[in-house]
Image (cartoon, rainbow, N blue to C red):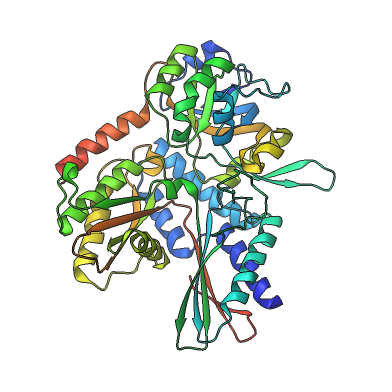
Amino acid sequence: MTTLTTPISEATIRALKVGDEVQINGTLYTGRDAVHKYLHEGGQLPPEVNLAGGLLYHCGPVMMKQDDGTWKCTAAGPTTSIREEPYQAQIIGDFGLRGVIGKGGMGDQTLAGCQAHGCVYLHAIGGAAQVLAECVTRVKGVYLLEQFGSPEAIWELEVVNFPAVVTMDAHGNSLHREVFAHSQAELAKRL
Amino acid sequence: MASLLDSLIELIRRTSAELPEDVNAALVRSLEAEKKGTIAESALKLIERNIELAKRKSQPICQDTGSVIFYVECPLGLDQLAFEETAREAVQQATKKGYLRQNSVDSITGKNDGTNTGPGAPAVHFHQHRSPETNIRLILKGGGCENVGAQYSLPAEKLHANRDLDGCRKVILDAVLQAQGKGCGPGILGVCIGGDRATGYEFSKQQFLRKLDDRNPEPKLDALEQDILKTANELGIGPMGFGGKTTLLGVKICAANRVPASYFVSVSYMCWAYRRQGVTLGADSQITGWLY
C-alpha cells in the first residue's frame, strides 16, 4: 500500500504501476461533467482552486449544510469517468494534475495524457459512498455551486486514507484495456 | 394524506440506505468466491463495509441516488393524482433529509433546483388489481448503470445475431462486455425480448422487481438466464471490471409480443448497489409489511 500526499511530485507518480493500491491524504477537488466541459471551453477556475500537483475527483457528493454554515459530506463515491474522455488529457496538461480519481477507467487519449504529463488514473470503488465519505475529514470550500448545482460543483475536500487502485499508469499501461481484451477473447470462445 | 407521506419517506430512506437481503446474500457469496489477495477481493470487502456503514448511519449506499421509480399496485378507485402529488412531496422531503441527492436537472436550462422533482421525476407506474391492498415498490437506479443499458435490433449483423434465442444470447453477452467497469459490477441484468422501443426498456426494468433467487416460470427463458449468468461469470471481468470471478449476480429475462417487422432486445443493467424495496400499506396508509 502506497500513501500519496498532495501535492504530489512527478517522480512519485511515475513510480506507480497498474495494480498498486494507494491511500490518499490531503486535498481532492471534485469535478465532473459540467466542470470538464466548462474548462474545455476556456472557463476559468476560481483563484482558490489550485490543481497543480493535485488530484481531480470525478464525484458528485451528497452535501448537507450545517447550522453553522459549514458543509458535511454524507456520501461521496466516484462517478463514471469515461464521459470526460474528450476533455481529460487537455485538462491534465493545462492544470498540471498528477492524478484523476474516478471509476470505470478512461480511454487512449487520457492514457497518452497520463504518459506525457506524469499523471495516473486512480480507480475508487464505485458505489462505496459511505466508506469514501468517512475519509472526508473536512469540506474546505465549494466553487461554482450556484452555476452548476451541488452534484456538479467543485468541492474542495480534505481526505485521510482515501483508498484507490492505480488502473492506468504513467507508462502507457491500462488494466481496463487488458481486462477488455481478455474478456472479449473469452467471450468469442463461448459464442 | 399525512401517513402516506410518512410511509413513502420511510420507503425512500430504507431503499437508499439498505440493500435487500437477497442482494446482500449474493454479494457475500461473491466475496467468498473471489481469489484472496486480489484487487477484486479488496473491492468486494470495501463494498461489504460500505453496505454495513450505510445501514448503520441511515445514509445513501451510493451518492448517486438515481432515478426514483415507483411501481404501485393499487385497488380500483385509488386517487392516482393525489398519490403522485404525495410522492413528489415525499421525494422533496427525503432530499432535504439527505436520503436522496439533489439529483434532478432541467434538461433545457441545465439548472438543478435542488428539489429532485420536475417533469418525469419521480416516475410513478400504476397497476390496478382486485385486492384491497396497496403495494408500493421503489427502485433507485443510478446513472452509471443506466448509461450502459443497450437496445439491440435483430438481426445484428456484426454480432451474427439472428432472430432467435441464440441471437438474443449473443447481444445480451455483448451488452455485458460493453458495460464492464462502467456500470458498477457485479451487476444484474433485466432483459426484455420483444416489445417496442419504449415497452422493451420498460419491461426490462420491471425485471428488477424480481428477487435474485427466483426462477423464471418459462423454461426457455429460465435456461437462457442460467446460461448467460454462467457464461458472463467465465469472462474474467469481475467486480468493478478489475478482473475476477463474479461479473453478474443475476439475469432476469421476460418476453413481450412484437410486430413482425421488429425484434428488439432491451437490456437494462443494475449496479451492485441494487436499491429495491417495497411496502404493503394498510387502510390508513401505514406500512403493514416489507416486500423484500
Instruction: Tell me: residue A184, above or below residue B184.
Output: above
**Who's the residue at 23% across and 72% down the image?**
B218
Q: Is residue B205 left or right of residue B284?
A: left
Q: Quadrant of residue B283?
A: bottom right
Whole-percent x and y of residue B159?
A: 18, 44
**Who's the residue at 21% across and 42% down the image?**
A187
Q: Is residue B5 left or right of residue B194?
A: right
Q: Is residue B186 left or right of residue A15?
A: left
Whole-percent x and y of residue B109?
A: 60, 44
Viewer can see residue B176: yes
Viewer-nearest residue: A53 or B41: A53
Whole-percent x and y of residue A166?
A: 46, 27
Number of dots carrying numbers: 0
Q: Residue furthest right?
A: A68
Viewer-nearest residue: B74 or A176: B74
Viewer-nearest residue: A85 or B276: A85
